Amino acid sequence: MELDWRPLHGQARGMSLRAFAKVRNKVRIVVDRNRRRFHRMRQFLAYLPAMSIDPRHLLARSFPVIEHAYSLRDTALYALGLGLGADPMDGGQLRYVYEGQDGKSLRAMPTMANILAYPGFWARESDTGITWQKLLHAEQEIHIHAPLPASGRVTGATRITGLWDKGPGKGAFLQQTRDITDAASGQLLACVVQLSLLRGDGGFGEGGSAGAPPAAHAMPEGAPDHVCELATPAQLALIYRLSADLNPLHADPAVAAAAGFARPILHGMALMGVAAHAVLRTVLDYDDTRFQGMRVRFTAPAWPGDTLRTEMWVDGNTVSLRTIAVERDVVVLNNSRVDLR
């Protein structure tokens, strides 16, 4: 901790240099003592037992229905936050970022379902008992029941659909599901499923869900059928956050460093969208009406500026995929798939 002595200069007039040095040293002693106390308290709090979760309460927890109105501008901004429009002469990309001269040509990326009527980071609320600081986003899944309108008003109803105990010291898996419905017609548009690993909340015993969380998607053997490399701009997370998650981890270098990252990381939902773009571009020729669903498993953070190589294996209406950050040779998505119509 550095101290600015300039405010003391006026008070130090008439004080000898030796007396001033004594005052300065006493202040430094107090600061150092308080700093040590702060670190001891932080270490003590880190070892305090977390509030145990009540599985029955959590599984029965109710959530307010969220209403979300969005515009053509919001839809285009979301697609820009995935890197679409990088080639403004590519008509396939353009349909997701430009409404056309008739104002009716804009398409919504299927993965935009991830951000519609989002209930927020409710795990921080005190009644959950979740050690939210140790929560990891493990998987994300979407099911598209009808094409998302490029603009409109939707509602989102969230519920807890699974809670599985891994045992003391091993954590637990929590699954939440959100149904997205057109507010005017009542038509179900999409279903969004999120699987989180609660690293600090295992060992609650009875009261959780029966069985086990969904098994990982099995990846095929052999060389992929298709490979698509998409460069991401260094400011991609700064663009994506304007549509969804304002967490400073994705924007502030100091916050990222405090979390142990060399730089702000890319949102997981943005990474999922980039992989979806790769499938749309390579397998579907940008025909999003055939995009029925997607499930991804996050394996490592991606950074804005990474070149993301998505490897794809096509088997009927299933596209298995893996995404690699090329420059770092890190697998950021694995055991993932897209379901086609």
Image (cartoon, rainbow, N blue to C red):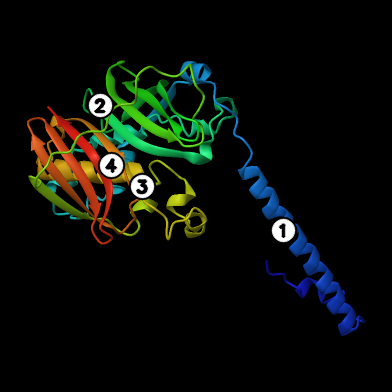
Quadrant that contains the C terminus: top left
Residue 203's place in the image compared with 308, above or below, is above
Decide which of tag 3 and tag 4 comes sooner along the chain.
Answer: 3
> In the visual, does 282 lie left or right of 255?
left
The number of discs equals 4
Residue 272, label in figure: 4
Circles 4 and 1, Cβ within 8 Å, touching? The answer is no
Report, in whole angstroms, how far the alpha carbon at label 3 lies from the one at label 4.
12 Å
| Nearest-to-viewer mark from 2 and 3 | 2
User: Which residue matches tag 1?
Assistant: 36
Report, in whole angstroms, how far the alpha carbon at label 4 lies from the one at label 1.
43 Å
Label 2: which secondary element: strand
Decide which of tag 4 and tag 1 comes sooner along the chain.
Answer: 1
Q: Position of residue 121 (x, y in %)?
A: 48, 34
Q: Position of residue 187 (x, y in %)?
A: 28, 17
Decide which of tag 2 and tag 4 comes sooner along the chain.
Answer: 2
Report, in whole angstroms, how far the alpha carbon at label 2 lies from the one at label 4.
14 Å
Label 1: which secondary element: helix
Please tell me which residue lies in front, 238 or 338.
Answer: 338
Please tell me which residue lies in front, 328 or 107.
Answer: 328
The amino acid type of the residue labelled 3 equals Tyr
Label 4: which secondary element: helix
Residue at figure coordinates x 13%, y 32% from the top left: 318
User: Which residue matches tag 3?
Assistant: 240
Residue 207's place in the image compared with 195, above or below, is above
> In the visual, does 162 lie left or right of 96?
right
- For residue 166, say whether it is visible: yes
User: Which residue matches tag 2?
Assistant: 143
